[in-house]
Structure formats: structure tokens, C-alpha cells
Amino acid sequence: MLNAKTQSSQNGEAAGSAFSIQPLPPLLPGDHLLYDIRSPWRDPIGWAMDRAIKLKTWSDVAHIEVFAGDPIAPGHLYSTASRSAGVDLYPFRSDGLVYVLRPSQWDEAEADKYFQRIARGQKYDWLGLLCFTLAVHQGSFHKMFCSEYARNLDRAAGCPSFAETWPGDKTAPGSYLMSPAFGLIYDCDLDYAVPDGTADWRKAA
């Protein structure tokens, strides 16, 4: 699924095993991409859903995806995510990207196995979103929303993003900003990227 070979991208030259997308720092497969709300003019339904997620999760983050490199063709970058169409491989988008987090541990082979064999093709868990309103206590089986997918992918990849018993359908996109398992490598509000994601940084409440 995820190919980290040195390739040139549509927006810049890759360095080493990372993919360089200007003005972002070089990205690696497994980097977690956190997004703000979508445009109300391009996607009014998505915009309304994103605003509701931000409101109910007390965060400035509405969506999360996991960077996948260029698994199909050199220079064509992708991420894996659960979008409204379900879990799949999607073209990478920088529009609306507010943070990039790099995991301290990531087993790409196991992440790929989980994506291909279990997650890919699952529908979006609309019912699961109600977990954040306390209207339900558990989402739908064999369906996942964005951060639920990211949490389950983390488990497969050996990334201790949250306590082992913490369920994916209780994980909000903004929760990742408080996880000690990640380093910040990009913040859209800063004029620079944090080198190598090594800074001990947490989003202030």
C-alpha cells in the first residue's frame, strides 16, 4: 500500500525516504494528517458535518487521515482514510490541512495488512459519530469514521496512540493532539516546521 521510495512529487523533490510537498515538511507513510472544516461552497454537507464534529469534540480539528506516499504511481500522493464514501485510498489533499503528526513507532507492513485485509471497503460509521453526543454508546460494526479508522490502524501498526483498551469509536480527531505517541512536524499557524517531529509539544487546551 505505502511506498516510501525516493520519488519526485508533483510539488517538490523527495528527500531520502520522505515525500516533500511544499510548503509542508517531507512526509513519511504513517504521518497523521489533521484537517479543519471543508469549504461551505464546495461541500456544504461536509462543511456542516465538520462543524458539528468540531463542536461536539471541543477541538479545532474536524478530520484525520494517514499519509500513504505514492503506492500507485510515482509523484501521485495518497492517504488512507474513512471519508464519506468509506475506508479507502484517496488522493492526498493539502487544502484544509492544519497539523501533521509523526508517530514514534510505526510498522508499515502490519498497517498495510490491516488496511488491505480488514479496513478497506468498510462504510462510514455515521451512527458512531453519535458517541460524541452520548446518544449512543457504540458505533456500527464493520463501519468506521475517520478517527476510528486511524485509531484501529495505529493498533495494527504498533503505534501506542492511546491506552490499549481505549476504543476507536470514542476517539475524536482532535484527541491526537494530546497523544504522547506523536511528534508535531507541521502546524499551519507557525512559519516553520518542527524538525523531525522531535519536539515535546502538546496543543494547549
Image (cartoon, helix red, strand yellow):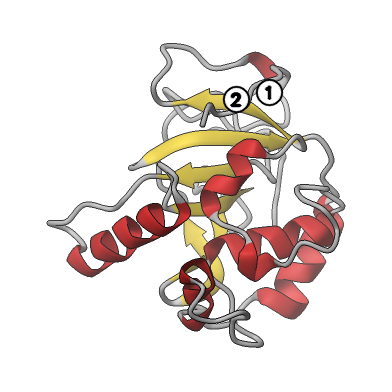
Q: Mark 2 Cα within 10 Å, few/some/many (few <14, many 20+)?
A: many
Residue at figure coordinates x 60%, y 25% from the top left: 185
Question: Would residue 130 appear left or right of 112 to someone viewing this image?
Answer: left
- Tell me if residue 78 can be seen: no
Instruction: Determine whether the residue tagged by mark 1 lies in a helix, strand or loop.
Output: helix
Q: Residue 23's spot in the image, x, y percent? A: 42, 22
Residue marked by disc 2: 185
Looking at the picture, which amino acid does disc 1 mark? Gly
Q: Mark 1 Cα within 10 Å, few/some/many (few <14, many 20+)?
A: some
Residue 64, placed above or below residue 129: above
Residue at figure coordinates x 77%, y 38% from the top left: 181
Instruction: Determine whether the residue tagged by mark 2 lies in a helix, strand or loop.
Output: strand
Residue at figure coordinates x 45%, y 79% from the top left: 126
Q: Quadrant of residue 197?
A: top right
Quadrant including the N terminus: bottom right
Residue marked by disc 1: 197
Observer-nearest residue: 31 or 132?
A: 132
Please report whichever mark, 2 or 1, sits nearer to the chain's N-terminal start.
2
Q: CA distance from mark 2 to mark 1?
A: 4 Å
- Tell me if residue 66 can be seen: yes
Residue 205, labelled with which disc? none
Q: Are marks 2 and 1 in contact (CB under 8 Å)?
A: yes
Q: Quadrant of residue 156?
A: bottom right
Observer-nearest residue: 138 or 12?
A: 138
